[in-house]
Image (spheres, rainbow, N blue to C red):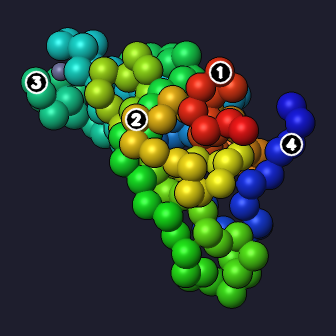
C-alpha cells in the first residue's frame, strides 16, 4: 500500500484488548469488519464479549465494503498536544459503515477541508499504516459524492 499518513506519530493511538484483537488484526489486513452476533445477528462496536441484545457470547467478524456515511462529527481546533499544532483543525466523526447494521465507528474524516464535512456525507475507508503492528481506518469523502472539489 502507499503508506499514506494523515496524522503525526505523536497522535495517541488506541490500545488493543483480548476482545478487540480480532478487529485490530483485520485492520492490519486493511479489512473493515464489525462484530456480529451469531445467535441474533445484532452488530456491535466496539467489540465486546456478549451481545447486548440477546446475551449470546457467539460472534463473528463480518467484513464490510468500506463505504459509509458521517453520522455526526466535531472539528478539533485546539491541539491537545504541542506536536499536533500543525494538525489542527481536524475532524473526529462517528461513521456509520454500510452493511454494519447500525454500528458506528469513531474515526476521522481526512482528505478534505474540515469545513466541508457534513452529517450524512458519503465517505469511504482509507487505511493509515501507523506501524508494522497497527493500521487505523480513517474516512475520506467518496470520489463520486460528498465535498470533493
Ligand atoms: Zn445476539
Q: Name the residue under label 4.
A: 3
Structural crowding at the residue carrying mark 1, measured as other residues with C-alpha within 10 Å and reported as few (<14), some (14–19) or many (≥20): few
Q: In which quarter of the image is the N terminus?
A: top right
Structural crowding at the residue carrying mark 2, measured as other residues with C-alpha within 10 Å and reported as few (<14), some (14–19) or many (≥20): some
Residue 117 position within the rendered picture, expressed as x and y whole percent measured from the top left: 52, 48
Distance from disc 1 to disc 3, alpha carbons, whole Å, reads: 39 Å
Are circles 4 and 3 on residues that touch, CB within 8 Å?
no
Q: Which of marks 1 and 3 is in front?
A: 1
Are circles 1 and 2 on residues that touch, CB within 8 Å?
no
Element type where label 2 sits in the image? loop
Q: Name the residue under label 3.
A: 54
* Residue 119 shows up from this direction: yes
Give the side of residue 115 with respect to residue 1, left or right: left
User: Which residue is pictured at 38% across the width and 23% down the height?
Assistant: 100
Q: In which quarter of the image is the C terminus?
A: top right
> Who comes first in sequence, dot 4 or dot 3?
4
> Who comes first in sequence, dot 3 or dot 2?
3
From this view, report whether residue 101 is shown above or below residue 27.
Answer: above
Q: Which of marks 2 and 4 is in front?
A: 2
| In the image, farthest residue toward the right | 2
Q: Mark 2 points at which residue?
A: 120
Q: Nearer the viewer, mark 4 or mark 3?
A: 4
Asked if ligand 1 lies within 8 A of label 3, the reply is: yes
Distance from disc 3 to disc 2, alpha carbons, whole Å, reads: 30 Å
User: Which residue is pictured at 44% across the width and 20% down the height?
Assistant: 98
From this view, report whether residue 123 is shown above or below residue 60.
Answer: below
Element type where label 1 sits in the image? loop
Give the side of residue 36 with respect to residue 51, left or right: right
Asked if ligand 1 lies within 8 A of label 2, the reply is: no
Amino acid at each position: 500500500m502507499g503508506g499514506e499518513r494523515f496524522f503525526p506519530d505523536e497522535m495517541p493511538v488506541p490500545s488493543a484488548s483480548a476482545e478487540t484483537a480480532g478487529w485490530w488484526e483485520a485492520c492490519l489486513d486493511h479489512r473493515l469488519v464489525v462484530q456480529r452476533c451469531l445467535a441474533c445477528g445484532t452488530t456491535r462496536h466496539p467489540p465486546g464479549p456478549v451481545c447486548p441484545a440477546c446475551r449470546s457470547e457467539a460472534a463473528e467478524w463480518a467484513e464490510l465494503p468500506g463505504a459509509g456515511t458521517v453520522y455526526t462529527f466535531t472539528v478539533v481546533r485546539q491541539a491537545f498536544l504541542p506536536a499536533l499544532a500543525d494538525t489542527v483543525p481536524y475532524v473526529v466523526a462517528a461513521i456509520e459503515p454500510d452493511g454494519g447494521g447500525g454500528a458506528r465507528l469513531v474515526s476521522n474524516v481526512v482528505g478534505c477541508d474540515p469545513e466541508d464535512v457534513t452529517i450524512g456525507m458519503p465517505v469511504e475507508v482509507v487505511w493509515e499504516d501507523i506501524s508494522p503492528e497497527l493500521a487505523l481506518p480513517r474516512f475520506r469523502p467518496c470520489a463520486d459524492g460528498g465535498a470533493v472539489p
